[in-house]
Image: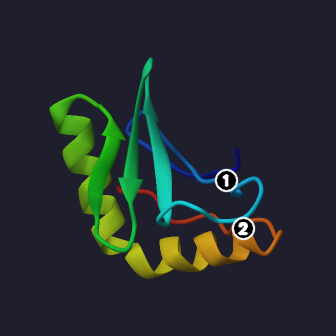
Amino acid sequence: MPEISRFFGIIIRMFVEAGGPHHTPHFHAYYQDQVGIFGIDRIERLAGSLPRRQERLVLAWAELHQEDLLSNWQVLQQGHPPVKIEPLK
């Protein structure tokens, strides 16, 4: 699963949907041993969980980079590698 960003110990990844797209555009956020799955069209947690502070950081980052995330989703689904997205600073 390609890494598209990393900040404050959080790793953001996105991957190709095997067998064709069947989910809403989304990305995965990893922090230590926890993972949250977040929607892109509407920035929200879809599944999993992260500690409250890390989830707020992920949501803020996603709001800032929603267009980049959607673009990466489309690129990945076409079989091309994603572009790195600036981390929170």
The residue closer to the viewer here, 75 or 85, is: 75
Q: Earlier in the sequence, mark 1 or mark 2?
A: 1
Work out whether 53 lies above or below 87. Answer: above
Place of residue 55 in the rendered image (x, y in percent of width and height, measured from the top left): 25, 42
What's the coloring here? Answer: rainbow
Crowd band around label 2 with a 10 angstrom C-alpha radius: few (<14), some (14–19), many (20+): some
Residue plotted at (47% across, 59% down): 26
* Helix, strand or loop status at disc 1: loop
Residue 36, relative to residue 18: is it above or below? Answer: above
The reply, left or right, for residue 57 in relation to residue 13 is: left
Query: Residue, x 45% and y 57% (percent of image)?
Result: 87
Q: Quadrant of the C terminus?
A: bottom left
- Residue 53 vs residue 74: left or right? left
What residue does disc 2 label? 76
**Quadrant position of the N terminus in the picture:** top right
On the image, the x and y values in percent for residue 52 come to: 16, 34
Residue wearing tag 1: 15
Secondary structure beneath label 2: helix
Above or below, 22 relative to 2: below
Q: Identify the residue at the far right of this view.
A: 79
